[in-house]
Image: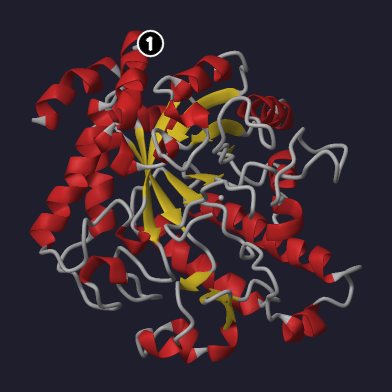
């Protein structure tokens, strides 16, 4: 997982508008797409991209730009998605317990102006929803439930920040600050903060990434002793209690979304390995150093089987044939998990690895991601793919995106 708010999947822990018009016409119109999503019609194949805002990974290009320049940059990303024949954007709107809309719960996001709590002079989420739909794109609002800051200095938070008003809510760990998932009042608050966006905007989905309990840091312990002493008595061990805390967050959030707006979907994009088969016979044929069940206290397989979520996007950020976590083997495993559940399976794709020098040889092949699509086509349960991330959708490393877009063009 990287500090951009999305997993790297590493084993140690992870003229556009004019050109796009024909693409939009050949796909569903915005109205038709909305109708399909809301009235049970067959859904389009998912062809999505993540648009990350934490640490200004994809957007805004830098902090402190004028509202006009921020808006223009956002629209450019939406236009690029259409030009590449994608149909959904997963827009990160709550990167570090702050907001990209005028939230009554949390301050304006630091990534906009460089100062947490400073009004940027416009509404990025409202604009993104409206402009995405005008282009025939779904807009999934991407939230990070528990991360407060990529540092541990509470004085750097706004004075009215909930983590300062309620200092007992947050735990420093590994150089960062997190809300404590073991506190019922925290779970309720983060739900309220996220669901405010569901009430106020015509989003198509609530989307979470792979951060639940934080990724393990060698030699460090997550400081939830007091919460465990108070609430963990009926559990066999702390790990079981932590998994129950995460289960509660997922189950409660899903139910509350449907109560507010039944048509809004709920999706999660976890680290790609639930458990290795060596740990659990039900696990995947992998040897990953991180397992979501054990290390992040997130029983992602259970959420699918219980139907608590509408879709799942495992981050399969490895190439085909990678020894410790083979993309092909993991697609097959996840296909088996979702079969018969009614939960849609999309595959998270590591576009950012294409052509990167530090990556295995497979990622130097421009066709690696196209090979992924060929493989996914063999599994009926796989309903599409989502690419990390928007910056690479625009830059087209190795021409890999152009190859994918041409494939989508032929498919219609």
Residue 332 x %, y %: 69, 24
Residue ID for mark 1: 411
Residue 340, placed above or below residue 249: above
Q: Residue furthest top?
A: 410
What residue is rendered at 31% in x and 22% in y? 28
Image quadrant in which you'd find residue 403: top left
Quadrant in the picture for the N terminus = bottom right
Colour pattern of the rendering = secondary structure
What residue is rendered at 61% in x and 78% in y? 185
Quadrant in the picture for the C terminus = top left
Q: Nearer the viewer, residue 358 or 27?
A: 358
Residue 151 x %, y %: 45, 77
Residue 326 x %, y %: 65, 30
Question: Is 78 displayed left or right of 19 in the figure?
Answer: right
Residue 177 x %, y %: 52, 77
Residue 327, placed above or below residue 203: above
Mark 1 crowd level (few <14, some 14–19, many ≥20, 10 Å Cα): few
Question: Is 109 displayed left or right of 174 in the figure?
Answer: left
Look at the image and tell me whether residue 126 can be seen.
yes
Image quadrant in which you'd find residue 241: bottom right
What residue is rendered at 45% in x and 74% in y? 149
What residue is rendered at 26% in x and 54% in y? 59
Look at the image and tell me whether residue 39 can be seen.
no
* Mark 1 secondary-structure assignment: helix
Question: Is 401 displayed left or right of 257 in the figure?
Answer: left
**In this figure, what is the number of numbered marks?**
1
Q: Which of 392 and 130 is in front in this view?
A: 392
Q: Which of 311 and 179 is in front in this view?
A: 179
Residue 310, placed above or below residue 211: above
């Amino acid at each position: 997982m990287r500090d951009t708010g999305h997993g790297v999947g590493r084993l140690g822990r992870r003229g556009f508008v004019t050109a796009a018009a024909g693409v939009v016409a050949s796909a569903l119109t915005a109205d038709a797409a909305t109708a399909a999503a809301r009235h049970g019609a067959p859904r389009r194949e998912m062809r999505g991209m993540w648009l990350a805002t934490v640490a200004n990974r994809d957007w805004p290009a830098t902090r402190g730009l004028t509202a006009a320049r921020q808006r223009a940059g956002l629209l450019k990303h939406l236009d690029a998605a259409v030009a590449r024949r994608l149909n959904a954007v997963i827009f990160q709107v709550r990167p570090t317990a702050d907001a990209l809309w005028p939230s009554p719960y949390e301050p304006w996001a630091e990534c906009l102006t460089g100062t947490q709590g400073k009004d940027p002079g416009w509404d990025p989420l409202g604009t993104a929803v409206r402009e995405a739909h005008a282009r025939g794109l779904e807009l999934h609002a991407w939230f990070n439930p528990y991360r407060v800051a990529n540092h541990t200095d509470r004085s750097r938070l706004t004075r009215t920040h909930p983590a300062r008003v309620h200092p007992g809510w947050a735990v420093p760990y590994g150089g960062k600050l997190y809300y404590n998932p073991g506190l019922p009042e925290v779970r309720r608050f983060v739900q309220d903060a996220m669901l405010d966006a569901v009430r106020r905007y015509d989003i198509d989905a609530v989307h979470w990434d792979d951060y639940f309990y934080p990724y393990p840091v060698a030699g460090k312990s997550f400081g939830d002793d007091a919460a465990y002493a108070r609430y963990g008595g009926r559990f066999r061990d702390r790990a079981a209690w932590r998994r129950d805390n995460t289960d509660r967050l997922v189950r409660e959030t899903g139910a509350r979304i449907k109560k507010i707006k039944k048509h809004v979907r709920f999706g999660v994009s976890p680290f790609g390995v639930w458990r290795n088969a060596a740990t659990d016979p039900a696990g995947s044929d992998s040897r990953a150093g991180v397992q979501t069940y054990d290390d992040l206290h997130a029983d992602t397989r259970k959420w699918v089987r219980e139907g608590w979520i509408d879709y799942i996007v495992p981050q399969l950020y490895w190439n085909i044939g990678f020894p410790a976590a083979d993309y092909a083997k993991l697609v097959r495993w996840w296909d088996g998990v979702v079969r018969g559940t009614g939960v849609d399976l999309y595959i998270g794709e590591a576009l950012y690895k294409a052509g990167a020098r530090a990556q295995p040889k497979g990622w130097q092949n421009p066709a690696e991601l196209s090979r992924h699509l060929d493989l996914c086509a063999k599994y009926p349960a796989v309903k599409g793919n989502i690419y990390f991330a928007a910056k690479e959708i625009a830059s087209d490393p190795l021409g890999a995106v152009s190859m994918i877009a041409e494939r989508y063009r032929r498919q219609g």
